[in-house]
Amino acid sequence: MLEVRRSLDRGYANQGGLKSFHTFSFGDYYDPVFEDFGALRVINEDRIKPGKGYDPGPAETDVEILTYIISGELEHKDSLGNTSVLRAGDVQRWSAGAGVKQSEHNPSTSQEAHLLQVWVKPGATSAVPGYEQKHFPASEKRGKLRLLASPDGEDGSLRIRQDARIYSGFFNAAERVEFEVGKGRRAYAHVAGGSIAVNETRLNAGDGVKITKSGRFALQSGRDAEVLMFDLP
């Protein structure tokens, strides 16, 4: 079964320097149908103006936070002492197990930062917090799904504390891949850019789809598409 989440149906928040679309309930936005999807708790699409960002708020606890850069740059600082600048192709995993704080700013003076922030509920709580960052070249995602995060760090992916796997890929024209949803599992596809069909269901930038039936599903007929795929318990 496919349940489509259209971009225009998402929550929206405008804080001046930060504009954010919420696929799932977040902050002041609440949708009982899209509160979460299994272990997937948050997909926020953020656009941060040059020189803007957000400073530490209340400490996050027991969540795996992944930041996926679509374009531009993002400077990250946290209370664990980590400081880094993320660029397109970079993915950051920040495990807020014991409660930590972060700040994220766009260091550019001219270019907007465009990113996705993903929260995954961990399988174990109150774990030691941690940080990891890796670059995944576009060539590894062209016409296929590249594993970005997994519970065991498989194939050079980031390690997360959940039986979930996160992939991304670029698809255009005849480029096509099939994704298998195992028995008793579920999947979610989110289009970060362009347009693509999941089987025959057309999705555009910002759209997503819940997949609650096991079997093989095709990502096909892409039009400069950038896609994230979540394999979830």
Image (cartoon, rainbow, N blue to C red):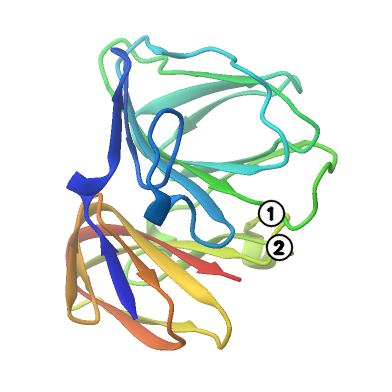
Tell me which amino acid carries mark 2: Pro
Which residue is more in the foreground, 35 or 89?
35
The spot of residue 117 in percent (x, y) is 47, 39
Q: Residue at the spot x=28%, y=23% of the render?
A: 112
Q: Secondary structure at mark 2?
A: loop
Mark with earlier residue (2, 1): 2
Q: Residue at x 41, y 28 (%)?
A: 28
Q: Quadrant of residue 127?
A: top right
- Look at the numbered disc 1 and give the secondary structure of its residue: loop
Q: Which residue is mark 1?
A: 160
The N terminus sits in image quarter? bottom left
Residue holding disc 2: 151
The correct choice, above or below, for 69 with respect to 180 in the image is: above
Query: Where in the figure is residue 68, as x and y percent of width and height?
Result: 45, 43
Question: Are the residues tagged 2 and 1 within 8 Å (C-beta)?
Answer: yes
Task: Name the quadrant containing residue 228.
Answer: bottom left
* Relative to 51, 221 lies left or right: left
CA distance for labels 2 and 1: 5 Å
Q: Nearer the viewer, residue 105 or 109?
A: 105
